[in-house]
Image (cartoon, grey):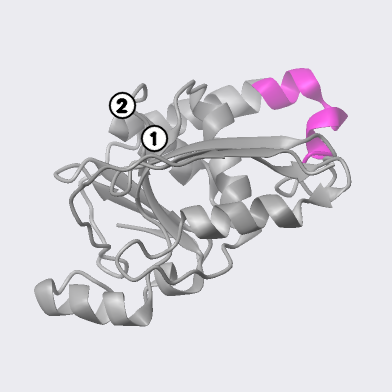
Amino acid sequence: MTLFLAKLLVDSGSSSTDNELVPRNAFDFQLVRTIHRRQFVSALLAGPALALARPMYAATTAPRSLNFLHTHTGERLAVEYCGVDGYLPDALASVNHFLRDFRTGDEHPIDPSLLDLLHRLTGLTASRRPFEVISGYRSPATNRQLRRRSEGVAASSLHMVGQAIDIRLIDIPLPTLRAAALSIHGGGVGYYPASNFVHVDTGRVRFW
């Protein structure tokens, strides 16, 4: 049975943009190295069992859930998006609606691999709070509008194809969230400390 819970509340928030193809160099990679060392030690202890878990969830049948809070709409979503037999269509539909373009109401399928990436981030950071979403799906019209305001918005933003999300976790320092995302090597990672969010996507591996 598909199990998911969506709770909708109304609120307001500020806009954000992504700067997807502009690299940055001022990273503190000590956090990444620390995470890698911990994962290496865990691998030594876990042995063959850990190898069976690669690539991301390919051999895993355990249910997977996520919790979200949208900073613009105030909506909340607690969803089990994957069950023992695979992804749950009704739950994915609820995610598509939750991560819609809040400016236009347009919806687009969200890449399930992006949800798996967020699930891994929850495990790596041990966060107990929902992902605060600044930007999920972004329609081409909205992307053009944001590009007129800022040169930092990519013309071919992965937000427009449901492969990107801008997030934060209020119980996890932003540099730690960034370091965890970098350690996954699951796609792009953008760091925006001034706006207090991290961008993650399932495109090619890169960072800025």
- Residue 8 highlighted magenta (yes or no): no
Q: Which residue is mark 2?
A: 173
Q: Which residue is mark 1?
A: 177
Which stretch appears magenta?
42-53
Residue 29, position as x, y percentages in the image: 34, 37
Q: With respect to residue 138, does 206 lie above or below?
A: above
CB contact under 8 Å: marks 2 and 1: yes
Amino acid on which the number 1 mark rests in the picture: Leu
- Residue 50 highlighted magenta (yes or no): yes
Q: Look at the image and tell me whether residue 135 can be seen.
A: yes
**Considering depth in this image, is 46 or 145 the residue closer to the camera?**
145
Using the rendered view, name the quadrant where residue 81 is placed: top right
Q: What is the secondary structure assignment of the residue under circle 1?
A: helix
Q: Quadrant of the N terminus?
A: top right
**Considering depth in this image, is 124 or 69 the residue closer to the camera?**
69
Horizontal relation, residue 80 to residue 95: left or right: right
Q: Residues within 10 Å of mark 1 (few under 14, many from 20)?
A: many
Amino acid on which the number 2 mark rests in the picture: Pro
Q: Quadrant of the C terminus?
A: bottom left
Residue 73, position as x, y percentages in the image: 32, 48
Residue 158, position as x, y percentages in the image: 43, 70
Q: With respect to residue 152, does 47 lie above or below?
A: above
Q: What is the secondary structure assignment of the residue under circle 2?
A: loop
Q: CA distance from mark 2 to mark 1?
A: 6 Å
Residue that lies at the very extreme toward the left in this rendered image: 149
Using the rendered view, name the quadrant where residue 196 is placed: top left
